[in-house]
Amino acid sequence: MRLFWKVFAVLWLATLLVGGSGFLVSRALQQDWMLLQFHPQLRDFASQLVAEYEQQGPEQAQDWLEQQLSDHRLRARLFNANGEPLLAGTLWPTARQHLINEAENSSSRNRYGRRFHLVWSGDLASYQLSLHVPTPELFRWQRTPFALIANISLAMALLALLSLLLSRYLTNPLRRLGQAAQTLGDGHYEPDSLQPSLRRRDEIGDLSRQFQHMAIRLQTLLDSQQQLMRDISHELRSPLARLRIGLALANRQPLAADDPLWQRLDHECSRLDGLIGDILTLSRLDSHDQADEVFDLDQIVSETVDDANFSAEDQRIVLQGETHSQLLGWPQQIASALDNLLRNALRFTPDDGEIRIQLSRHGTQAMICIEDSGPGVPDEWLKRLGEPFARLPGQAADSGHGLGLAIARRAIDRHQGQLSFDRSPQLGGLRAVISLPLDRTRARKNLP
């Protein structure tokens, strides 16, 4: 059975049980009210008697009571507000006379009944009414409970409608989540498909927003992986083609050990090995098989700068400031991101040039600014920096594969940080700004 019908059945039956039990309890506690409401003769008995008395007079009111006794065996007597009798009525003078008359004129079943004492307000005054209903009349109204059945049927219909609307309200978001999960599995997720559920402020809305975040993340990773595979195929084709040509030339004629072709083949193998290494590094950033840990950001930056100083020839690397920050994450990935940014700066910084690393802390953000004195990057290419295999126009073929900045961006994104590029106002080259949040650490480890 579908969840919709399960929810509908449970809500409807639960409401019926609660309403039915309440109805039965109220009927048991208020039988007089039920009798006066549904009995066809008693429903308007008091109002008709008062109207006869006020409009037609005592004699006509007495005749009306006699007629009610003859037709429906209803006995009554009318009093004023002080309890003084206004009509002789049709009640017995005493309770003993009542029992004697019932024993003589009726069966044993008619000896019982109900006595009501009512207060009624007419157009001219207030009245009191004593009314006796014999046993047969007490149950006659139950043989044709049309009004009661109509009320119960109407209540059941309204409850069914409310249960239907509530069931749709609860199950429609789940159905949309199922459809969104199916489209996500097919690889073409549409974020707008969950818009009605995202506006809810309950647990289903929270679930929809979490699913939306997960789905967008997965779709982005899937798209980036597909684009990466296309780029990898394109990048691998060139060195493999050159290797194939070189091997074909080597097979045609014997070559000396110092032939430049061997150096060319070795160079292509080195490029291919470096490209594969960068691809593996980039793919490991998307895996979550490594546990995060708390590390000192300033120490990671200092160690990475020390390593870069060994590969620097005539460039100067200057480290300034401190963040005094501890992060929760993967220190090797942060170190790899910094190393790629520094190697990129060293590659384009001329001799006697300067590379400046500035550390600072702004509120809940740790900032790392890396500037170089190279030629810089055109403004229209700043947004494309960090894309896999992105190369600037005129860039030398042996200047890298375009994966270094992509590795840096992916590592910083995994730490919920941001990497942006612009032109350095002081050194004139490229400036890379890393912003890493600190509240993620406090939320996970309760650090001060």
Image (spheres, helix red, strand yellow):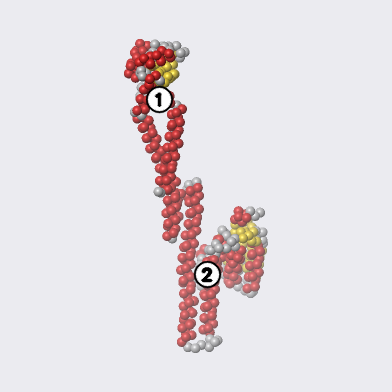
- The residue under label 2 is 279
The image quarter containing residue 189 is bottom left
The image quarter containing residue 181 is bottom left
The front one of 64 and 75 is 75
Picture coordinates of residue 280, whole percent (x, y): 53, 69
Picture coordinates of residue 152, whole percent (x, y): 38, 33
As drawn, 101 above or below 181: above
Looking at the image, can residue 234 be seen?
Answer: yes
From the viewer's perspective, is the residue at label 1 or at label 2 nearer?
Answer: 1
Element class at badge 1: helix
Write the residue at 48% across / 48% down: 204
Structural distance between the alpha carbons of marks 1 and 2: 87 Å
Which numbered disc covers residue 107? none
Residue 343 lies left or right of residue 68; in this view the side is right
Q: Dot 2: few (<14), some (14–19), or many (≥20) neighbours within 10 Å?
A: some
- The residue under label 1 is 35
Write the residue at 60% across / 73% down: 350
